[in-house]
Image (cartoon, rainbow, N blue to C red):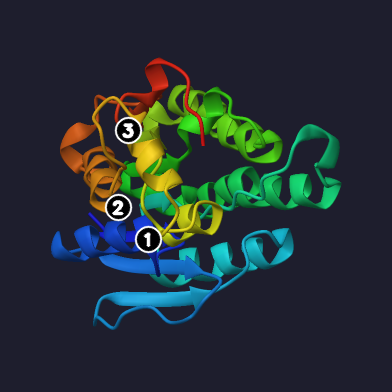
Amino acid sequence: MNRAAIVTGGNAGIGRSIVEHLLEAGYEVISLDRRGDAPGHSRLHTVEVDLTDATATREAATEVATRYAPTTLIHNAGVIRPALLADVAHDDLIALTNLHLGASVALAQAMLPAMKAAHFGRLVLISSRAALGLATRTSYSATKAGMLGLVRTWALELGPLGITANAIAPGPVETGMFHEIVPADSPKVAQIAAGIPVGRLGRPNDIARAAMFFASPENGFVTGQTLYVCGGTSTGSLAL
C-alpha cells in the first residue's frame, strides 16, 4: 500500500498537527498550503498553492497525484470570512466554495486512479460544527455543510472500491484562525470556553487524532460519517 497522504493547510494549526501525526505513523506527506514555510522533515513535501483559485488547485492536484500517487486525503484548509447576511460578499462565497468544495472534488478526482489501482483510499474532509448554523457564517457554514453531502455521496459511490469517505466537524479550536476572530487576550475566549460542555476549547491534536482514525487502513468499515469533535457544542447552541 502506498503510504502517501495529502494534507491541505498543513503548515499551521490543525493541519500541522495532522501532518505530525501522519509523519509519526510513517506516511509520506504532501502539504498543500498557501504558505511555503512548512517545518522540515525528510518525508514532508510542501506545494505552495492558493486553493481558492480553482485553476491553480486542479494543476496542483494533478501534479501531486502524478508524482506521489497518494491514497489518503485530509482536506483541512479553511477560511471563515464572517459577515452578517446583509454584508455577505459574493466574492467571499465563491472563494469559500472553491476552497471547501471545489478543492475537495478536484483533489479526490486526481487521486482516484491511484486509489482504484490500490483498491484502497481514505478521503477525510474537515468540516465544522458551524455546518449546523452560526451567526455571521453564511458562506462558511454553507460550504462546510456541503462537505457532509460530499462524503455521504462518495461513500456510496466508492465503497465497493475499498475507498472510504468521512468528515470531521470541529468545534472552537485554539488556532491562529480562531484568534483572528477572537483575539487571544480577549475575555471572550474564557466566555466561549465556559459555554462549551466540556469546559475548554479544542486543541489541534483533538482533531488530528480523529483524522488518524478515519485515515487508518484498519477502519474500512466506517464510511459516510460525520464526527463532531466539538466538546459537546453540536448538542445545542453556540455563541461566538
Residue 13 shows which numbered tag? 1
Observer-side mark, 3 or 1, equals 3
Q: Is 120 situated above or below 176? A: above
Q: Is 165 situated above or below 59? A: above
Residue type at tag 1:
Gly
Residue toward you, 91 or 7: 91
Q: Is 153 situated above or below 92? A: above
| Quadrant assignment, res 175 | bottom left
To which residue does mark 3 refer? 194
Q: Residue at x 23, y 51 (%)?
A: 205
How far apart are the two marked residues, 2 and 1, measured between alpha carbons?
6 Å
Residue type at tag 3:
Ala
Residue 162 in sight = no
- Pinpoint residue 115: horizontal percent, then vertical percent: 39, 48
Residue type at tag 2:
Pro
Observer-side mark, 3 or 2, equals 3
